[in-house]
């Protein structure tokens, strides 16, 4: 049985991947958080896929696109880093993603999906795997989607048996996964299961129903219990060893993010002596980012309120350029940056508490 860490945007970057690799080395394959294939890779993405930052890790870059040429172009960029396969994300349920018919958004348009995959697999001379859900509003189209997937040489098909509207609620639709097991040719496409594997009971329930399944992708379950795969593999460890591994895993993630945010190299050995200061700085930085994003939100609302005035004072062409400028959305600014800083603050407090206890 092979186990993979699910790609989670803003969470499973190289800092977290390395922490798992160093302290809970039971994961067979990792995937990058999705890379918008329409854009050139920036410094952050290049740093995330750099082999120097992923030593000893089997890593697959994941593309977010529904345009074959974009996926082909994205594949050319990581090649110098030694990557060959590309995974295409057709499962993300995020509203900002599906509004562009990307991620699970394309599942509502089977003909568009078929055209995209036909173009992609005609042009691709490298392995292309896919991560998908089983529908958009409901799973009525799942048989049609399975029929489409079966037409192409997909190297690996990871199925999360929920629809977009489920997000991460409700229970996985196991009848839909059963249909995939029946219809997907295992000699052409490897089938991987993803969804709600959180303990030995959920794992046994899956393998009892599908004894032929050989690959499982786990996301949230591994963050709730980093030792989960060890338990599923029957690897035992006493409480002292588990506590030590958890502490070291925790400290490596914290030191990694401190290095990223501060620009100063931090190591886990530096953490214990600086817990109180780190906790305070983490919280202050969190509120600093919240304040900045709130001020940005206020300024954007202010500009919106004088919309008509600006339209009278600025030429139509200039106004159109302003409207199309690439400012981040208010919701994006308020949700993404503070969340990372809160992660640092949370890790700081909980790490310090763990040491004190």
Image: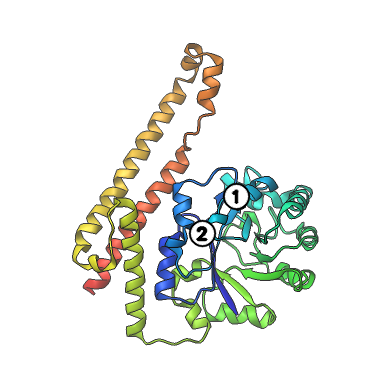
Is disc 1 surrounded by few (<14), some (14 to 19) or many (20+) residues within 10 Å?
A: many
- Near-viewer residue (295 or 47): 47
Where residue 3 sits, quadrant-wise, is: bottom right
- Give the secondary structure at mark 2: loop
Q: Residue at x 29, y 48 (%)?
A: 285
- Near-viewer residue (215 or 290): 215
Q: Is residue 292 above or below residue 113?
A: above
Horizontal and vertical percent position of residue 188:
76, 69
- Quarter of the picture containing the C terminus is bottom left
- Near-viewer residue (73 or 148): 73
Is disc 2 surrounded by few (<14), some (14 to 19) or many (20+) residues within 10 Å?
A: some
- Give the secondary structure at mark 1: helix
Q: Tell me, yes or no, if residue 315 can be seen here.
A: yes
Instruction: From the image, tell me which residue sits under label 1.
Output: 74
**Side of 114 relative to 279 (left or right):** right
Instruction: From the image, tell me which residue sits under label 2.
Output: 8
- Quarter of the picture containing the N terminus is bottom right
**Side of 120 relative to 78 (left or right):** right
Q: Residue at x 36, y 57 (%)?
A: 343
| Residue projecting furthest to the front | 80
Q: Is residue 336 above or below residue 194?
A: above
Horizontal and vertical percent position of residue 81:
52, 57
The residue mark sitting in front, 2 or 1, is 1
């Amino acid at each position: 049985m092979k186990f993979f860490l699910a790609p989670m945007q803003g969470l499973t970057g190289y800092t977290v991947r390395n922490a798992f690799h160093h302290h809970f080395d039971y994961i067979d394959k990792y995937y990058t958080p999705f890379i918008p294939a329409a854009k050139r890779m920036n410094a952050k993405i290049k740093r995330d896929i750099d082999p120097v930052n992923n030593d000893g890790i089997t890593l697959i870059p994941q593309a977010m696109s529904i345009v074959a040429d974009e996926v082909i172009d994205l594949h050319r960029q990581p090649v110098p880093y030694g990557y060959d396969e590309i995974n295409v994300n057709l499962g993300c349920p995020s509203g900002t993603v599906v509004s562009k018919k990307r991620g699970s958004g394309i599942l509502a348009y089977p003909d568009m999906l078929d055209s995209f995959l036909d173009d992609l697999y005609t042009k691709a001379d490298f392995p292309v795997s896919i991560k998908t859900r089983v529908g958009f509003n409901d799973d009525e189209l799942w048989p049609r989607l399975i029929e489409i997937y079966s037409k192409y040489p997909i190297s690996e098909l990871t199925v999360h048996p929920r629809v977009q509207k489920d997000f991460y609620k409700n229970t996985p639709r196991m009848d839909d996964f059963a249909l995939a097991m029946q219809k997907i040719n295992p000699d052409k496409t490897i089938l991987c299961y993803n969804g709600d594997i959180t303990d030995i009971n959920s794992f046994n329930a899956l393998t009892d129903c599908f004894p032929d399944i050989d690959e499982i992708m786990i996301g949230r379950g591994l963050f709730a219990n980093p030792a989960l795969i060890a338990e599923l593999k029957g690897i035992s460890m006493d409480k002292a060893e588990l506590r030590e591994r958890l502490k070291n895993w925790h400290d490596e993630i914290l030191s990694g993010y401190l290095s990223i945010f501060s620009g100063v190299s931090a190591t886990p050995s530096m953490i214990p002596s600086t817990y109180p200061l780190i906790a305070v700085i983490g919280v202050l930085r969190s509120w600093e980012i919240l304040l900045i994003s709130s001020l940005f939100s206020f300024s954007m609302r202010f500009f919106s309120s004088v919309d008509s005035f600006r339209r009278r004072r600025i030429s139509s062409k200039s106004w159109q350029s302003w409207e199309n400028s690439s400012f981040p959305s208010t919701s994006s600014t308020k949700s993404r940056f503070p969340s990372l800083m809160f992660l640092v603050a949370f890790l700081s407090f909980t790490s310090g508490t763990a040491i004190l206890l």
